Image (spheres, rainbow, N blue to C red):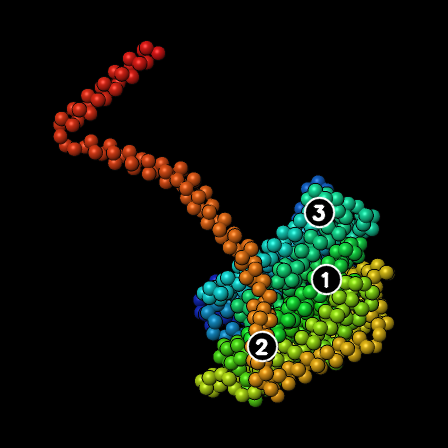
């Protein structure tokens, strides 16, 4: 049961690829690939329920399923083993549930596309690599899943490779993640250097004894645990799009909408959070690294929320919302509230997948239009999508008693309970970001569904509700967006958390901010709800009651508006610092190094010299006998001269 839940997506991926190759009838190949991949994911989801149920009982015990040995070299012994504990059980459930919904949704959304079997195969392959990552028993297997997710995301983001923007977005995602992965690889190498093993259990058991050890890093003697955790967190920053390495995430919207839902809701972007939580035994002994995680997470939350205020592409608004919510998860982990981070990851997976797939339903209804400024007045035509988008937005804004209310509330309370400067920073930034979240969520709803229609007459004539195969997954996700917070609270962060998590999450007694969250002042949850309602009220006032005011504000504060619209100019900054300089160096190496030196002195130079000599020699081929006699005479004189000089020497 355990191994089958992990390998079913891989089986589905291989089967879809085989169908695409063997079946010549395109309709039959499309239908066959859709059925086999969706069936495998639904089966994996059902098995995940059994696995999760096994860890909610009183007799839950972690277990490891060993597949085979990967590496045996000296003291390095790495096995391919599947680790099943509370953390992996939660992630298997989250990944397979959202992925199953996305697979079924794709049957309707991708209808008519020329490469449906390939798309379904990529989706299943992506899911398999994510399951490899969350069930890893050692750093090497985690890196295998980590890089596999990166490769699959490249294939999915650039799925419509005929579009230059899709190709550019796929390459950008791949390259930006390589920056973070460089730190991740260094961190893994450092772990082996310090601990002599890459097995999680061996490393975690030795952490207390190694906590004070120092290592030489770039000529500096630094605390080993802090250095290793920061390098590993660098990988998490890239994969989870944290501030500085976030620029790939909005551009990833170039992929099909089901890809956006899968990547940004439950899989790739949450990998960094899962990694930090899995390595909690290490991070607990690196307080400086935890402070960095908290600061980066909180800063990402406010940055992405501020940018989301003014974006006009429906998918990009939700993408920046994802980036902001990931910031919440990271600063929760940074204040040692790892279980709260996982709680928000779980609830977020449902309501964010609901919002992404709901936006896909809107795009489908609007004949491909994604600009919310060209929508409006469509709620009567798509009432089901409208209600489901409201449910997702209520959960995202943390309105009682939707899923986001429970998880976001405990994160803010844990940040307050940390009683540290960086914890206070995270708390107040989280409150401000919650206000912005509510505002941009309802800005999206009001501009998309309310007001006078702003689309052209032809588009409005064709506005229609999505087919049932696209709506069924939304119903399922809506249930999670409403009830997952209430159902999971006791297990994740309530009285049953210690029994549920067991050894999967380890927190030092002095760092138990989740316990402190239960004793936080009553005004904190009230404030969190209040700012959400204020944000909704502001959006209503600006986009329903006085729709002319936002334009006036943008004109009055044009500098700030452009700063936010252009995403704090991170792309422009990176273009100037890295892209242009790299292009200049590459061009110089091409023109001078390769063209002038290598080709100039090598193949091209030799060819040019041979050609020049041949041309000069050919001038003697005139056809006149006295010319040939003259050349022969010169040759004879030359030979005699060379002979006499040689004799003299």
Could you say whether the residue bearing mark 2 is in a helix, strand or loop? helix
The relative height of residue 9 versus residue 647 in the rendered view (above or below) is: below
Name the quadrant of the C terminus.
Answer: top left
Could you say whether the residue bearing mark 3 is in a helix, strand or loop? helix
Q: Quadrant of residue 386?
A: bottom right
Query: Which residue is rendered at x = 37% and y = 38% of the image?
Result: 605
Alpha-carbon span between mark 3 and mark 1: 24 Å
Q: Which mark is residue 295?
A: 1
The relative height of residue 211 versus residue 381 in the rendered view (above or below) is: above
Say whether residue 429 is visible. Answer: yes
Q: Are marks 2 and 1 in contact (CB under 8 Å)?
A: no
Q: Earlier in the sequence, mark 3 or mark 2?
A: 3
Closer to the eye: label 3 or 2: 2
Query: Which residue is rendered at x = 56% and y = 68% of the image?
Result: 566
Query: Which residue is rendered at x = 84% and y = 68% of the image?
Result: 516
Query: Which residue is rendered at x = 67% and y = 59% of the image?
Result: 236
Residue under label 3, please give it: 190
Q: Earlier in the sequence, mark 3 or mark 1?
A: 3
Residue under label 2, please give it: 556
Name the quadrant of the N terminus.
Answer: bottom right
Could you say whether the residue bearing mark 1 is in a helix, strand or loop? helix
Other residues around mark 2 within 10 Å, as few (<14) / some (14–19) / many (≥20) = few
Q: Are marks 3 and 1 in contact (CB under 8 Å)?
A: no
Alpha-carbon span between mark 2 and mark 1: 32 Å
Residue 31 lies, in percent from the top left, at 51, 72
Q: Judge by depth and name the residue closer to the eye, 403 or 37.
A: 403
Q: Earlier in the sequence, mark 2 or mark 1?
A: 1
Other residues around mark 3 within 10 Å, as few (<14) / some (14–19) / many (≥20) = many
Q: Judge by depth and name the residue closer to the eye, 127 or 217.
A: 217
Q: Which mark is residue 317?
A: none
- Which residue, as the protein is rendered here, is positioned at the far left? 625
Closer to the eye: label 3 or 1: 1
């Amino acid at each position: 049961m355990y191994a089958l839940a992990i390998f079913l997506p891989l089986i589905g991926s291989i089967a879809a690829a085989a169908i695409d190759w063997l079946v010549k009838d395109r309709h039959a190949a499309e239908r066959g690939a859709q059925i086999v991949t969706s069936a495998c994911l639904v089966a994996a989801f059902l098995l995940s329920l059994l696995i999760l149920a096994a860890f909610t009982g009183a007799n839950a015990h972690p277990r490891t399923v060993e597949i085979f040995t990967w590496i045996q070299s000296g003291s390095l012994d790495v096995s391919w083993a599947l680790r099943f504990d509370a953390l992996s059980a939660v992630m298997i459930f989250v990944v397979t549930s959202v992925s199953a919904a996305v697979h079924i949704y794709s049957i309707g959304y991708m209808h008519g596309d020329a490469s449906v079997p390939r798309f379904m195969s990529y989706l299943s392959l992506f899911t398999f690599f994510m399951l490899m990552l969350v069930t890893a028993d050692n750093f090497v297997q985690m890196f295998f899943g980590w890089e596999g997710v990166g490769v699959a995301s490249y294939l999915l983001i650039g799925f419509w490779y005929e579009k230059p923007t899709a190709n550019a977005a796929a390459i950008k995602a791949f390259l930006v993640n390589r920056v973070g992965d460089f730190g991740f690889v260094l961190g893994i190498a450092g772990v082996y250097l310090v601990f002599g093993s890459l097995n999680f259990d061996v490393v975690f058991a030795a952490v207390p004894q190694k906590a004070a050890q120092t290592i030489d890093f770039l000529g500096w003697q630094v605390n080993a645990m802090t250095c290793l955790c920061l390098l590993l967190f660098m990988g998490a920053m890239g994969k989870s799009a944290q501030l500085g390495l976030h620029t790939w995430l909005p551009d990833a919207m170039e992929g099909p909408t089901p890809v956006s839902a899968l990547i940004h809701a439950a899989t790739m972007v949450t990998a960094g959070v899962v990694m930090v939580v899995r390595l909690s035994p290490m991070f607990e002994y690196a307080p400086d690294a935890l402070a960095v995680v908290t600061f980066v997470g909180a800063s990402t939350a406010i940055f992405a929320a501020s940018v989301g205020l003014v974006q006009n592409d429906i998918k990009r608004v939700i993408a920046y919302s994802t980036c902001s919510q990931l910031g919440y998860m990271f600063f929760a982990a940074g204040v040692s509230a790892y279980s709260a981070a996982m709680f928000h990851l779980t609830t977020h997976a449902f309501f964010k997948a609901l919002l992404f797939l709901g936006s896909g339903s809107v795009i489908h209804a609007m004949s491909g239009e994604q600009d919310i400024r060209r929508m409006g007045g469509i709620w009567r035509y798509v009432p089901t999508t409208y209600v489901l988008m409201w449910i997702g937005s209520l959960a995202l804004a943390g309105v009682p008693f939707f899923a986001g209310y429970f998880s976001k509330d405990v994160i803010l309370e844990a940040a307050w309970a940390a009683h540290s400067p960086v914890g206070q920073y995270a708390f107040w930034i989280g409150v401000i970001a919650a206000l912005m979240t509510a505002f941009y969520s309802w800005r999206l709803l009001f501009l998309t569904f309310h007001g006078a229609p702003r689309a052209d007459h032809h588009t409005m004539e064709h506005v229609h509700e999505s087919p049932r195969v696209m709506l069924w997954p939304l119903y399922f996700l809506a249930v999670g967006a409403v009830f997952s917070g209430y159902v999971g609270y006791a297990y994740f962060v309530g009285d049953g958390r210690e029994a549920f998590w067991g050894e999967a999450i380890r927190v030092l007694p002095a760092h138990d901010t989740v316990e402190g969250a239960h004793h936080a002042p009553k005004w904190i949850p009230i404030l969190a709800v209040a700012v959400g309602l204020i944000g909704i009220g502001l959006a209503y006032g600006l986009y329903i009651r006085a729709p002319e005011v936002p334009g006036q504000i943008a004109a009055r504060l044009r500098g700030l508006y452009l700063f936010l619209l252009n995403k704090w100019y991170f792309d422009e900054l990176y273009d100037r610092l890295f892209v242009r300089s790299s292009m200049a160096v590459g061009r110089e190496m091409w023109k001078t190094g390769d063209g002038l030196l290598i080709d100039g002195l090598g193949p091209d130079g030799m060819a040019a010299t041979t050609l020049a000599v041949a041309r000069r020699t050919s001038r003697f081929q005139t056809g006149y006998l006295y010319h040939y006699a003259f050349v022969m005479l010169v040759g004879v004189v030359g030979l005699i001269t060379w002979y006499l000089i040689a004799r003299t020497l």
